[in-house]
Amino acid sequence: MSTTLLDAAGQLSQAQLPSTESEVWRYSRIAELDLASFHPAVPSVTVTGADGLTPDPTRTAAMVATMPVHDVFDELHAAHAHTIEVHVPAGKVLTEPIVVTHHVTGDGSATFPRLVVHAGADSEFTVVERFESDADVRALIVPRLVLHAEQASRVSYLGVNLLAHSVWQLGHQQATGERDSTTLLATVALGGDYARVRTDARVVGQGATTKQVALYYADGHQMHDFRTLQDHIAPKTNSDLLFKGAVQDTAKSVYTGLIRIGEDAKGSAAYQTNRNLTLSEGAWAESVPNLDIRTNDVKCSHASTVGPIDDEQRFYLESRGIPPETAERLVILGFFDDVLAALPVGSLRPELRQRVAEKLLGGAA
Amino acid sequence: MSTLEIKGLVASVAGKQILNGIDLTIQSGEVHAVMGPNGAGKSTFSAVVMGKPGYEVHAGQVLLDGVARLALPTWQRAQAGMHLVMQYPSEVPGVDLTEMLAEAYGARGRATDTLAADVAAEAERIHFPSALLDRSLNVDLSGGEKKRTETLQLALLAPKFAILDELDSGLDIDALRDCARRVEAATHETNLGVLAITHYNRLLEELKPDHVHILVKGRIVASGGPELADQLERDGYEAFTGGEAADEPAATSSYDDLFAL
């Protein structure tokens, strides 16, 4: 195996792909990926709102070194990553979000962006990472996020997937929260062909809190695949997760979540809620919540639902003279309302709500 | 002047026939009370008239101003001027009252410029706390607050006919009085015709019925004036559930066949 995992033609090597027989890739469409049809490319990235922040290559390297290497995508990342660093010094509060925009372009391109976010003690800021693309471009993007929140920092991250329905996304996020820190990891996934995001949220310092919210909505032949870990290492840590999704046409979604409370995490509280709307007969959603609790004195709950729009809600609205398609739009936008309200950048909500509404109007593709 | 006619309505739910032939005619401005014991088919009646999915109509007709409406979906019945005040209004998370009413107005081609002010005025009139107007529909509302918002919607949408499905259930005496008075006022102000379906007499102390009908086992077994409700209060439903025509009020001769059980 070469260090860049390329074949003689400069394309990516197919040999190492994981199998859906391994639990981590269960339900995924990984078997459809023709990795050899892609070649590594330089990502197109713009960053705004980070003026005045200085790079810290030593720390970046140390943070990158904490990222595990599990599979071929991790190996490819190590070989081809393009790193964006955000280091916010201790005590610094940024009122405007830092916005990182990836623009995927070029048929056959594979890009490996790596966003490193370091929050100094008692800092406070928000990072938005947008994934956009050319229309109909056949491409692969493998983004990585490594986020470290020092003591008492408050960090919000929002990933927005607006990729064309021809782009594959295989994302992995790792966040670590030190004592009394608060991290919010938010996702809005509307785009992509097969779009997967794995999020490992670890709370390693006493009193740390991590929240995760996601809104995902797949139509046509799209598939959204989420895998979350709420990993409680330290005592008196808190985690809360709210993932809400909808599938229509023949789209699919999978949510697999694990709450893990370690031996030392006494006095912790962890909550996990996943709700899914199936809007068409041919659409499919799966929800797989899991708990792994290794100590006493914890508060823990999880809930998951998969089902169509509630008939009673629909009838209620229609009984007021509201036509079925409008009633459905109200119910679906209403369903997503608490997630939209929980997103870290309020000014983005109208745009995102509008994009959801447009997807609804798109109807059967 | 409008007319709502229910003719020979026979319907079932989940394979069980609940309505066994109901006839009823309501004119604008009139209040008709349909009273019945548990299991008489009261909620089925309101659901079928409004077109709730899951109910099967086997015979009969519902006509609004002479036009048959049973083939129409619920929302078109509503737009035509029929309105259902629900016994258990559904919670709709993430959708607030004004947003919903804006869509209901829009669907009727009504302007929404004054909607917010109209909602505020009507909320004050029905004593619905304005602080609750931003909440999702029926979410975290008490029984009385739900019925107040139901009544508020009825007042603003101003239909020709309202079916009140147990408006009096689950609400306190103050809310009952406010809601009943508001409906009563609408019969004068907008000439609303009312079909008040209820188990108990107490709703009718504020909402004065012109006609009272007793519903037993999916049939109207007696019809009369307000005195029929008084008789019911005195004698209970037992007097009407024996299947005998002996106590039948004189005014119900057209329902004679319903007593041949």
Image: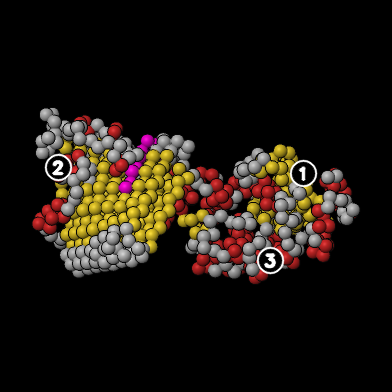
At 63% from the left and 65% from the top, the residue drawn is: B171
At 60% from the left and 65% from the top, the residue drawn is: B144
Q: CA distance from mark 2 to mark 3?
A: 74 Å
**Residue A118 position by quadrant:** bottom left
Q: Nearer the viewer, mark 3 or mark 1?
A: 1
Q: Where's the N terminus of chain A, which quadrant?
A: top left
The numbered disc on residue B125 is none
Per the image, the residue denoted by label 3 is B181
Judge whether residue A19 is colored magenta. Answer: no
Q: Where's the C terminus of chain A, which quadrant?
A: top left
Residue A11 higher or lower than A360, as above or below: above
- Label 3 vs 1, first from the N-terminus: 1
**Residue A152 position by quadrant:** bottom left
Say whether residue A131 is left or right of residue B78.
left
The numbered disc on residue B21 is 1
Q: Is B207 or B46 nearer to us in this picture?
A: B46
Question: Can residue A44 be seen by looking at this rendering?
Answer: no
Amino acid identity at mark 1: Gly
Per the image, the residue denoted by label 2 is A80
Query: Which segment is the magenta one?
Result: A219-227
Q: Are marks 1 and 2 on the same chain?
A: no
Say whether residue A187 is left or right of residue B254.
left
Q: Nearer the viewer, mark 2 or mark 3?
A: 2
* Residue B198 screen position, x and y as percent: 71, 58
Q: CA distance from mark 1 to mark 2?
A: 76 Å
